């Protein structure tokens, strides 16, 4: 008896056009629209039944879906977690290796895309989607991060999930140490770097919005737009004055004349420190002297760069470690200290101070930042 022929799995086309999305699932078009608006979990089952293969029955139903988006061809491992009443409670979709010999970029994540769908208890006929991992990963068939995002959004649109969220922890790895792992001190937050250079993050450029932007879109846009356009001469004048008085205070151990504004994320207005402690001076000095040193050197070698955005861009291209140190100096983890004045030595006002504080609050909490996007619009 001749061996049974292996039938290749069908390919799910996740291209952005609405017509393709409507035709990939082998059900009536009206049914797709109805499912999309009323119960995405029925659509998930229809999608899984149509495209999954190597299916194993049980409380966890698993299979594989082959997907195409632009130039990327990926295979998703899919797990549908069912409750005792047979309803799908949770779905995992993650890419797998399809090109073992393809070189991945440095710092690539474990998957090109790992997206999860959850059924909220308060609204069982809806779903919440979360992107857990995203990476350009040729070994998984995904050539660009944009393709991975496109696949995630198209899957949401296909089953009728109204939105998607993620936590932006994107990082640029400058170098590795002797153990082969990257040092935290040589890593750059790509979100911070891009905001400094362009006034928005990479995900925002794809249409995602932070919670702060949802609260006040106009103020958010206006404040972030100020950051790349900060005048370098004025900024260095502030850093120079702050560096001078902080060094004098540290060396003389006389802090009474230094006034600091201490910002944290728990309250809108700063705490004004009139009588500084040693840690107040050392924390402020650590940030100011690093930023002052890097920016003055850059200003001397790049006199034509008049604003902060192009300056940070040039620094990041020339020296990744300087970019890492600069972003940490600009946006410290615990609190942001601004030098206001000192007795007998006035300090120039820091330019765009309100925009700077807003950006620090946005960036310093990036691991907790929920970014949402409506999946009804086509991604640019």
Image: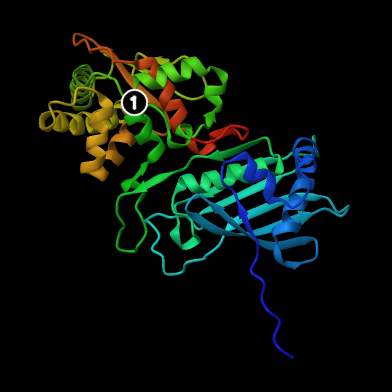
Q: Residue at x 67, y 72 (%)?
A: 7
Q: Which residue is drawn at 83% across and 50% down?
A: 87
Does residue 253 show up?
A: yes
As drawn, is 208 to the left or to the right of 340?
Answer: right
Tag count: 1
Graded by Cα atoms within 10 Å as few (under 14), some (14 to 19) or many (20 or more), the crowding at tag 1 reads some
Q: Mark 1 points at which residue?
A: 280
As drawn, is 43 to the left or to the right of 113?
Answer: right
SS at mark 1 in the image: helix
Q: Is residue 212 above or below residue 374?
A: above
Does residue 156 show up?
A: no
Q: Which residue is drawn at 53% across and 32% down?
A: 208
Q: Which quarter shows the N terminus?
A: bottom right
Q: In this view, does 371 lie above or below 52?
A: above
Q: In this view, does 105 lie above or below 197?
A: below
Q: Residue at x 35, y 55 (%)?
A: 182
- Residue 277 on image: x %, y %: 34, 24
- The residue furthest bottom is 1
Foreground of the two, 152 or 349? 152
Foreground of the two, 26 or 312? 26
């Amino acid at each position: 008896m001749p061996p049974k022929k292996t039938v290749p799995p069908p390919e799910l086309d996740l291209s952005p056009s609405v017509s393709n999305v409507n035709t990939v699932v082998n059900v009536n078009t009206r049914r797709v629209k109805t499912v999309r608006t009323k119960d995405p979990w029925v659509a998930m089952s229809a999608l899984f039944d149509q495209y999954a293969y190597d299916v194993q029955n049980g409380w966890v139903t698993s299979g594989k879906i082959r997907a195409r988006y632009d130039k990327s061809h990926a295979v998703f491992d899919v797990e549908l977690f069912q409750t005792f009443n047979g309803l799908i409670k949770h779905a995992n979709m993650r890419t797998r290796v399809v090109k073992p010999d393809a070189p991945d970029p440095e710092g690539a994540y474990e998957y090109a895309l790992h997206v999860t769908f959850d059924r909220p208890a308060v609204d069982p006929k809806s779903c919440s989607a979360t992107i857990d991992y995203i990476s350009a990963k040729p070994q998984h068939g995904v050539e660009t991060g944009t393709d991975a995002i496109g696949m995630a959004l198209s899957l949401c649109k296909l089953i009728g999930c109204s939105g998607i969220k993620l936590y932006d922890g994107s990082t640029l790895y400058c170098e590795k140490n002797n153990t082969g792992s990257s040092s935290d001190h040589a890593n750059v937050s790509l979100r911070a770097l891009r905001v400094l250079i362009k006034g928005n993050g990479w995900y925002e450029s794809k249409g995602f919005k932070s919670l702060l932007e949802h609260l006040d879109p106009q103020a958010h846009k206006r404040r972030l737009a100020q950051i790349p356009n900060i005048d370098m001469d004025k900024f260095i004048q502030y850093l120079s004055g702050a560096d001078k008085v902080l060094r004098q205070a540290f060396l003389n151990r006389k802090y009474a004349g230094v006034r600091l504004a201490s910002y944290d994320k728990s309250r809108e207005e700063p705490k004004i420190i009139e009588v500084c402690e040693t840690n107040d001076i050392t924390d402020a000095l650590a940030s100011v002297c690093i930023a002052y040193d890097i920016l003055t050197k850059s200003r001397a070698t790049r006199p034509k760069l008049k604003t902060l955005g192009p300056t940070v861009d040039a620094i990041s291209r020339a020296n990744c470690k300087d970019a890492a140190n600069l972003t940490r100096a600009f946006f410290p983890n615990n609190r942001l200290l601004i030098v206001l004045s000192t007795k007998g030595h006035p300090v120039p006002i820091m330019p765009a101070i309100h925009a700077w504080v807003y950006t620090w609050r946005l960036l310093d909490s990036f691991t907790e930042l929920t970014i949402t996007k409506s999946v009804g619009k086509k991604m640019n």
